[in-house]
């Protein structure tokens, strides 16, 4: 196991609601990245946080937002949920040393929007 | 733009036979390449990576991959397949200009038959 944990494991929401997903990084890591994986597809990058600041963002609307805390844990918030937001949300932690680094993934949160 | 392609949706191999899962890449600058595996209802597990150096990279569970610059490929291989290797395999690249976010292939389903 990677040491990256996510909660909750599963979640059911209705369209228009808001959701918060949580991620606890692996010890010693300072960077958290979030990905959305729709069924049967590869993950899509949402955003990355480094030292509590957003450090890169993919092609996702502003209703997807995040936070990173001093202990390097992180939250992903999604407002005004849409049916297409149904997916597996993956959190990955890594150590940013200014170059390419291995990202280690948590088990994911499966979100279903009805 | 950076991209990764996995040309096969599914690969079928008999147990004990060698396996190859194909990946080609298109990157500007240095290619940083990764393989991950995903079991049903699980997160992504890191297998191996190529950053620089020896073109043959060895990873977890007996897997290896060969970086071929002239063919822009990074195929995943294993000399003798196990039924337990059956899973979804993803190739990914990191992009220096986007703070090393991971850009993913669509995935290849590997089925090992007894």
Image (spheres, rainbow, N blue to C red):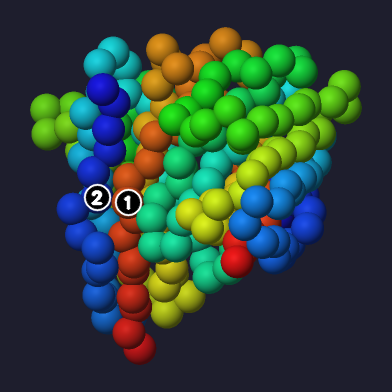
Residue at the outermost bottom position = B114
Mark 2 belongs to chain = B
Marks 2 and 1 close (CB-CB < 8 Å) = yes
Mark 1 belongs to chain = B
Task: Kindly identify which residue carries mark 2.
Answer: B6
Which residue lies at the image location 61% right of the left edge and 35% below the top edge? A64
Image quadrant for the N terminus of chain B? top left
Counting from the top left corner in percent of width and height, residue B90 is at: 39, 51
Residue at the outermost front position = A16
Counting from the top left corner in percent of width and height, residue A16 is at: 65, 51
Residue at the outermost right position = A71
Q: Nearer the viewer, residue A74 or B72?
A: A74
Q: Nearer the viewer, residue B75 or A12?
A: A12
Q: Residues within 10 Å of mark 1 (few under 14, many from 20)?
A: many
Compared with B16, B97 (above or below) is above
Task: Kindly identify which residue carries mark 1.
Answer: B106
How much space separates mark 2 and mark 1, taking CA atoms? 6 Å
Q: Nearer the viewer, residue A74 or B25?
A: A74
Q: Relative to residue B30, is residue A42 drawn left or right?
A: right
Image quadrant for the C terminus of chain B? bottom left
Query: Is residue A83 at all visible to an observer of this figure?
Result: yes
Compared with B67, B30 (above or below) is above
- Upstream in sequence: badge 2 or badge 1: 2
User: Quick one: SS at disc 2?
Assistant: loop
Which residue lies at the image location 55% right of the left edge and 41% below the top edge? A35
Which residue lies at the image location 67% right of the left edge and 23% below the top edge? A49
């Amino acid at each position: 196991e990677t040491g990256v944990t996510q909660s909750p494991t599963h979640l059911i929401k209705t369209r228009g609601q808001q959701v918060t997903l949580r991620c606890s990084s692996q010890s010693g890591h300072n960077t958290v990245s979030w990905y959305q994986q729709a069924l049967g597809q590869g993950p899509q990058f949402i955003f990355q946080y480094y030292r509590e600041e957003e450090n890169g963002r993919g092609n996702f609307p502003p209703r997807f937002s995040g936070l990173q805390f001093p202990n390097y844990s992180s939250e992903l918030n999604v407002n005004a949920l849409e049916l297409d937001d149904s997916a597996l949300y993956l959190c990955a932690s890594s150590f940013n040393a200014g170059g390419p680094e291995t990202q280690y993934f948590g088990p994911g949160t499966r979100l279903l929007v009805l | 733009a950076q991209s990764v392609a996995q040309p096969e949706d599914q690969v079928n191999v008999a147990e004990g036979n060698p396996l190859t899962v194909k990946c080609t890449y298109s990157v500007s600058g240095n290619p940083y390449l990764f393989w991950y595996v995903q079991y049903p209802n699980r997160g992504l597990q890191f297998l191996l990576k190529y950053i620089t150096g020896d073109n043959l990279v060895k990873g977890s569970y007996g897997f290896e991959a060969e970086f071929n610059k002239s063919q822009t490929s990074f195929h995943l291989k294993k000399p003798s397949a196990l039924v337990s290797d059956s899973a979804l395999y993803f190739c990914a690249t990191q992009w220096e200009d986007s703070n090393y976010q991971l850009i993913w292939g669509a995935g290849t389903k590997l089925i090992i038959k007894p």
